[in-house]
Amino acid sequence: MGQQLAIIVLVDTGNALESRTLEGNTYLFDNMKLQGSEGEGTGDLVTAVNSSTWSDGSQASEAVLNWLPYSLGSIPPTVPRSYQADRARQSDQQALDALSTLADRPATSTAETASELSRIQRTAGTRVRSTARSRNPSGHKLLDVTGNIVTDQGAGAHSYPPPVITDITGEAVDLKIIYPAEYGSPDLVTDGWYWSATVDTSRPGTYAYTMHIQLHELVHRAEDWLWEPVTLQVDSNLKITSEPKRNAFTKAGLGLLPLPLPLPLPAPPGLA
């Protein structure tokens, strides 16, 4: 099995949408810091990929990159996948209970009834649709970062949908250093879709690539609230070297692990 490398793409979605750029609003991490990655936690990450080759220089085993996008200012990805749908059902049930209570009250003035209905409507929240170009699931209610229903859609204090990588291009792809593709899996974070790539580790060098990332902006059109997709780009780099992998136990190159000497076995009964 190839070496598995994970690259976390953390986006400050609110600032990125406001400035219409991912530059300065993206933080990249990987699991190769010990192997020589540079720029961890910044937008200038250079991911180290240590090659494995045979004596003739040909590739002995491939490396596999996995990109995982996340968003600052969003509900944590550790919550159950059905969290937003569950919260929507809960708010609907609360609204129905409030309407039932209102119907059982003694007759009140029309103004008081209208005021109470308006309060119930705000408490129930609003479902937000997605446009045709969006990769974001449609029909979820608007939540804040604590998971509560947003009652004022124009206040700006809402959770953004997670970023979606829509394509990976650039020098590393054009030179066939990496072979990226979108895959489907029962992943609990990315709704079953993620981007991965195999790496040609037989060609040392530093190669740039570009991630195309779709964010979603809340807009109000024709009395509907919509998630409008906004696609931005951010660059990153891979550094492929022919240096040997380092042993995580000894911090040295490849070799035998240090093993403790075996303890002497006790003599069987009757032979002592």
Image (cartoon, rainbow, N blue to C red):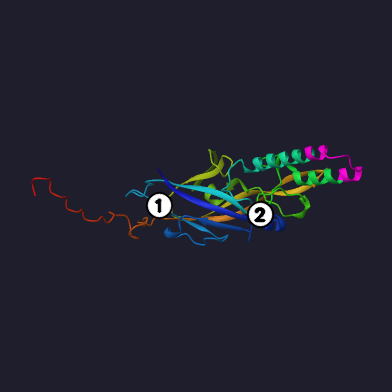
Q: Which residue is mark 1?
A: 51
Of 49 and 18, the residue lying toward us = 18
Which residue lies most toward the left here?
271
Which sits earlier in the primary sequence, circle 2 or circle 1?
Answer: 2
SS for dot 2: helix
Expressed as whole percent of the image width and height from the top left, the position of residue 63 reads 44, 47
Q: Which residues are magenta?
A: 100-114
Quarter occupied by the N terminus: top left
User: What residue appears at the point 34 percent right and 57 percent down from the top-left corner?
Assistant: 249
Residue 132 visible somewhere in the drawing: no
The image shows residue 79, relative to residue 14, as above or below, that is above
- Furthest-front residue in view? 106
Nearer the observer, 174 or 65: 65
* Percent coordinates x, y for residue 206 in the rendering: 49, 57
Q: Are marks 2 and 1 in contact (CB under 8 Å)?
A: no
Percent from the top left, x then y, of residue 49?
44, 54
The secondary structure making up most of the magenta span is helix
Q: Quadrant of residue 236?
A: bottom right
Which is more toward the observer, 213 or 221? 221
Q: Is residue 41 magenta-colored?
A: no
Q: Is residue 201 left or right of residue 172?
A: left
Q: Which mark is residue 13?
A: 2
Q: Please tell me whether mark 1 sits on a helix, a strand or a loop.
A: loop
Left or right: residue 59 compared with residue 140: left
Q: Nearer the viewer, mark 2 or mark 1?
A: 2
Which image quadrant for residue 16? Answer: bottom right
Q: Amino acid at mark 2?
A: Thr
Q: What type is the residue that disc 1 sits on?
A: Ser
Q: Residue at x 77, y 41 (%)?
A: 98
Where residue 29 appears, as percent x and y from the top left, is 52, 56
Q: Does the magenta portion include 105?
A: yes
Residue 42 lies left or right of residue 60; in this view the side is right
